């Protein structure tokens, strides 16, 4: 286990590690690949959707670290407003190429 910074409570430190290590890093690589693929065909929408995802992840992390599991819903919704359209854009690009 990674020790907490002294000014953090144990619970807050655990939430911060969980949101970074388990929640954000497990979705980030797939989103980067989708952004690169979609950026070839639609660079501006891919960048916009990726930015929405980033804003959502920041709000998710802040809410989760400050309020625990109940604080992550708004950021989770916003980040899904970024990753779900990115996936749909990938399907659209695959359909148009076929």
Image (cartoon, rainbow, N blue to C red):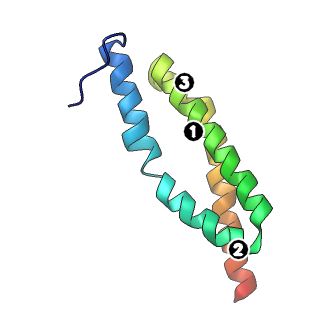
Q: Residue furthest left?
A: 1
First in residue order: circle 1 vs circle 3: 1
Q: Nearer the viewer, mark 1 or mark 2?
A: 2
Nearer to us: label 3 or label 2: 2
User: What kind of element bears circle 1?
Assistant: helix
- Is residue 2 among the parts visible in the rendering? yes
Tell me the residue at 70%/68% (across/down).
Answer: 39
User: Crowding near pointer 3: few (<14 within 10 Å), some, many (20+)?
Assistant: many
Spatial distance from mark 1 to mark 2, Cα to Cα? 24 Å
- Quick one: 42 or 91, which is closer to the camera? 42
Q: Which residue is mark 1?
A: 57
**Label 1 to label 3, Cα distance in Å?**
10 Å
Q: Secondary structure at mark 3?
A: helix
Q: Please give the label number shown on residue 63.
A: 3
Please provide percent x and percent y for residue 53. Answer: 63, 46
89 is higher (above) or lower (below) than 93: above
Q: Picture quarter containing residue 89?
A: bottom right
From what the image shows, is residue 25 above or below residue 37? above
| Residue at point 63%, 30% (across, down) | 74
Q: Earlier in the sequence, mark 1 or mark 2?
A: 2
Q: Quadrant of the C terminus?
A: bottom right
Q: Is residue 96 above or below residue 57?
A: below
Question: Pointer 2: residues within 10 angstroms few (<14), some, or many (20+)?
Answer: few
Residue holding disc 2: 40
Q: Are marks 3 and 2 in contact (CB under 8 Å)?
A: no
- Indicate left or right for 19 with 76 as reference: left
Q: Earlier in the sequence, mark 3 or mark 2?
A: 2
């Amino acid at each position: 286990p990674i020790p907490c910074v002294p000014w953090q409570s144990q619970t807050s430190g655990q939430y911060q590690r969980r949101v970074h290590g388990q929640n954000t890093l497990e979705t980030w690589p797939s989103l980067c690949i989708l952004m690169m693929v979609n950026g070839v065909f639609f660079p501006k929408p891919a960048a916009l959707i990726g930015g929405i995802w980033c804003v959502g992840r920041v709000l998710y992390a802040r809410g989760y670290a400050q309020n625990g599991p109940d604080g992550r819903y708004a950021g989770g919704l916003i980040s899904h407003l970024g990753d779900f359209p990115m996936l749909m854009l990938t399907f659209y690009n695959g359909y148009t190429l076929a």
